[in-house]
């Protein structure tokens, strides 16, 4: 049976193989977060309109669009939500296991732009020192800023 499957697999090369793989495997949404810092080491936090009351402060974040490199999702989301231009840095987190979502986080640095929030998604944007983070912040984002592991 295994030989038959292997032979069929070789016969359907190319796009057909990709279709079979796509149908057979789980599909994931990819949430991408940017730990954006300025020259003074402060971190950019946003008060998100759509997030739960009492936990609205967090980092710039959003979902990757089809074909987008995850580091560029940070650039796009920061620009859309704040008007600021950022340069992505190193990957700081890659986690899965929450339903069909993968979480990706990158460091990023401010390189320009003028702060102008998207009032549909964002209520407020402020720069914070890592040792003076606000109440009502997503705990996972606090851990990213402090460079700590979840449950660690």
Image: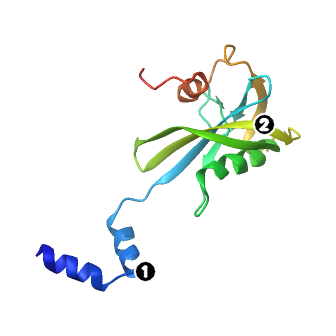
Real-space Cα distance between discs 2 and 1?
41 Å
Above-or-below relation of 129 to 106: above
Residue that appears at 34% across and 74% down: 20
Above-or-below relation of 96 to 3: above
Q: Name the residue under label 2.
A: 110
- On screen, residue 124 versus residue 7, left or right, reads right
Looking at the image, which residue sits at the far left? 1
For residue 148, the mark is none
Secondary structure found at label 2: strand
- On screen, residue 6 versus residue 71, left or right, reads left
The total number of labels drawn is 2
Q: Name the image quarter holding residue 11.
A: bottom left
Q: Nearer the viewer, residue 103 or 51?
A: 103
Residue 55: image location, x then y, percent: 60, 27
Residue 30: image location, x then y, percent: 52, 51
**Callout 1 crowding tier (Cα within 10 Å): few <14, some 14–19, many ≥20:** few
Above-or-below relation of 95 to 19: above
Q: Name the residue under label 1.
A: 15
Residue 57: image location, x then y, percent: 66, 28
Looking at the image, which residue sits at the far bottom? 11
Label whose residue precedes the other's in the sequence (2 or 1): 1
Q: Name the image quarter holding residue 35.
A: top right
**Callout 2 crowding tier (Cα within 10 Å): few <14, some 14–19, many ≥20:** some
Q: In which quarter of the image is the N terminus?
A: bottom left
Residue 123: image location, x then y, percent: 76, 35
Secondary structure found at label 1: helix
- On screen, residue 109 versus residue 3, left or right, reads right
């Amino acid at each position: 049976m295994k030989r038959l499957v292997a032979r069929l697999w070789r016969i359907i090369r190319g796009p057909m193989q990709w279709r079979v793989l796509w149908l057979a495997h789980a599909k994931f949404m990819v949430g991408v977060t940017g730990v954006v810092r300025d020259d003074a080491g402060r971190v950019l936090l946003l008060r998100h309109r759509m997030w739960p009351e009492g936990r609205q402060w967090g980092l710039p974040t959003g979902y990757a669009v089809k074909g987008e490199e995850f580091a560029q999702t940070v650039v796009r989301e920061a620009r859309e939500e704040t008007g600021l231009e950022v340069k992505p840095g190193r990957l700081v987190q890659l986690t899965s296991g929450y339903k069909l979502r993968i979480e990706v986080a990158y460091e990023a640095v401010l390189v320009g732009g003028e702060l102008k929030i998207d009032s549909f998604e964002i209520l407020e944007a402020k720069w914070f020192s890592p040792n003076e983070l606000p109440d009502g912040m997503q705990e996972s984002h606090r851990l990213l800023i402090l460079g700590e592991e979840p449950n660690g």
